[in-house]
Amino acid sequence: MNFKDKIIRLSEVDSTNAYAREILKKFPSIQEGTTIVAGFQTSGTGQDGKAWESHKEQNLLLSIIVHPDFLQPDQLFYLNISIALAVFDFIESFYIKDSKIKWPNDIYVGNKKIAGLLIHNDLEFNRIRNSIIGIGININQDNFNTDIPNPVSLKNILKKETDVNVCLENLLDYIENRYNMLKNKDFEKLFSQYHDALYLLGQETLFLDNKDEEFQGIIDGVRSDGRIRIITPQGIRFFEFREIRYIF
Ligand code: BTN
């Protein structure tokens, strides 16, 4: 099955992730790679429950349903790695040199965010039964709300519009390729390529911990369980997603 074989196109929906959840309730074994694409979301959701802003028909808004039951729950972070790498591959295909993956799964160009992922996993009997991979990529939007800290679109960078449908086809090819690597348990390669693309790796950076205390450190890498490893003057510290914020 090809990821481009089953695309459900909606002009408007609350959220493609929510729509995918409803589909899974009715058809829990729906074909892997089923993709829901929307031109506009009335309640597009980002990480931390924040709204995901996207003007009508300007950007890529999609959710892909997969059944990664070949992964153990402790290998779940590799799903995150493979999809982040696929979106990174897609951005790099425009010859954009300074694209990076900001841990755990934002795609950055320079110090600005061009894409984000929101993945929901459904675990059953110690196996991952379903995952909904929500992806938002800023393609042709010129301006963003001022309360979004650092967004950027492909158009802002390339200074020209790109066909969103062609983008979708190409993105799904990159995703299928990385997902096949995951299926083949090519974990070492995925892990090392994720590190090669990691934003601020090895650089002195300022962070805020979850007590709102500022600290300086150097990102040393990410553990296979998804925790980030930071070298600080006090020693090595590990953090889960949402336990730290980067200070720009
Ligand atoms: C983030 O905050 O970085 C994650 C953004 C994920 C947004 C996408 S858009 C398509 C899918 N549907 C949603 O409601 N959210 C995700």
Image (spheres, rainbow, N blue to C red):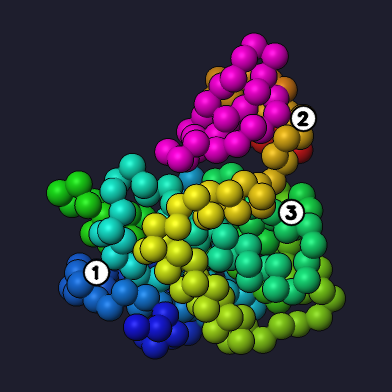
The one nearer the camera, 141 or 164, is 164
Task: Tell me if mark 3 has few (under 14), some (14-19) or many (20+) residues whose alpha carbon lies within 10 angstroms of its own.
Answer: some
Judging by the rendered image, the residue that carries numbered circle 3 is 112
Type of amino acid under label 2: Glu
Which residue position is annotated with label 1? 24
Q: Is residue 23 left or right of residue 224?
A: left
Q: Amino acid at mark 3?
A: Lys
The residue depicted at 68 percent of the width and 68 percent of the height is: 91
Residue 199 against residue 107 in the figure, above or below = above
Residue shown at the point (42%, 80%) measured from the top left = 3
Q: Are marks 3 and 1 in contact (CB under 8 Å)?
A: no
Q: Is residue 187 visible?
A: yes
**Which of the 4 quarters of the picture holds residue 203?**
top right
Q: Whole-Å distance between the Cαs marked 1 and 2? A: 44 Å
> Please, what is the dominant secondary structure of the magenta stretch?
strand
Q: Are marks 1 and 2 in contact (CB under 8 Å)?
A: no
The answer to which quarter of the image holds residue 162 is bottom right
